[in-house]
Image (cartoon, rainbow, N blue to C red):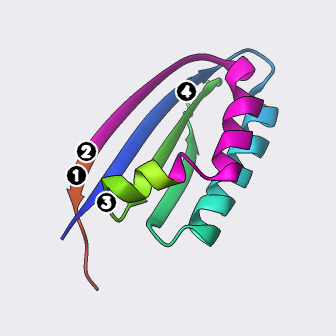
Amino acid sequence: MKHFAVWVQFDVKPGMVPAFLDAARLDAQGSVGNEPGCHRFDILQDPDVSNRVYFYEVYQDEAAFAAHREMPHFKTYSATTEPMIAAKSVLRLPVEAQHK
C-alpha cells in the first residue's frame, strides 16, 4: 500500500527557533492524536544549521494530507509560525507502507 509522505525544510528567523518548535510540537501532537490519516509526524533540528528544522510527515494518502491542512490546529500553527519563517521548501512523495 502506498502512503503519502511530506518532507518540509524550514529556515527559521534568528532567535525564533524555540517558539517555532513549541508551535510545531503542538501541531504534531494534534495531527498524530486527532487525525486517523496521520501516521507519523517527526520534527528534526539540523545539527549543522542551528535555525533549520525539518518535518517528516506520513499520511494514509493525499486526501488525508489535504484534510490535515484544514484542521484547526494546523491553521493555528500556520498563523503563529508564518512570521517566524525565513524560507520553506516542501517535498511531497508516495512511500511504500511498511507492514509489521
Q: Please report the bounds of the magenta region as a residue range.
A: 68-92
Numbered label tally: 4
Q: Is residue 45 visible?
A: yes
Q: Amino acid at mark 4?
A: Phe
Judge by depth and name the residue closer to the eye, 81 or 18: 81
Residue 74 in percent (x, y) is at 64, 46
| Quadrant that contains the N terminus | bottom left
Numbered mark located on residue 94 in the image = 1
Label 1 crowd (10 A; few <14 / some 14-19 / many >=20): some
Residue 90 magenta: yes
| Quadrant that contains the C terminus | bottom left
Are the two marked residues, 1 and 2, in contact with CB atoms closer than 8 angstroms?
yes
Closer to viewer: mark 3 or mark 1: 3
Residue at the spot of label 4? 10
Closer to the chain start, of discs 1 and 4, is: 4
Closer to viewer: mark 3 or mark 4: 3
Residue 13 in percent (x, y) is at 70, 15
Residue 38 versus residue 71 in the image, above or below: below
Residue at figure coordinates x 75%, y 42% from the top left: 23
Closer to the chain start, of discs 3 and 1, is: 3
Kindly report the distance in space between the C-alpha atoms of the residues bearing marks 2 and 4: 18 Å
Closer to the chain start, of discs 2 and 3, is: 3
Q: Amino acid at mark 3?
A: Asp
Residue at the spot of label 3? 61
Numbered mark located on residue 64 in the image = none
Kindly report the distance in space between the C-alpha atoms of the residues bearing marks 1 and 2: 4 Å
Secondary structure, mark 2, is strand
From the viewer's perspective, is 67 left or right of 16?
left
Secondary structure, mark 3, is loop
Kindly report the distance in space between the C-alpha atoms of the residues bearing marks 2 and 3: 10 Å
Numbered mark located on residue 93 in the image = 2
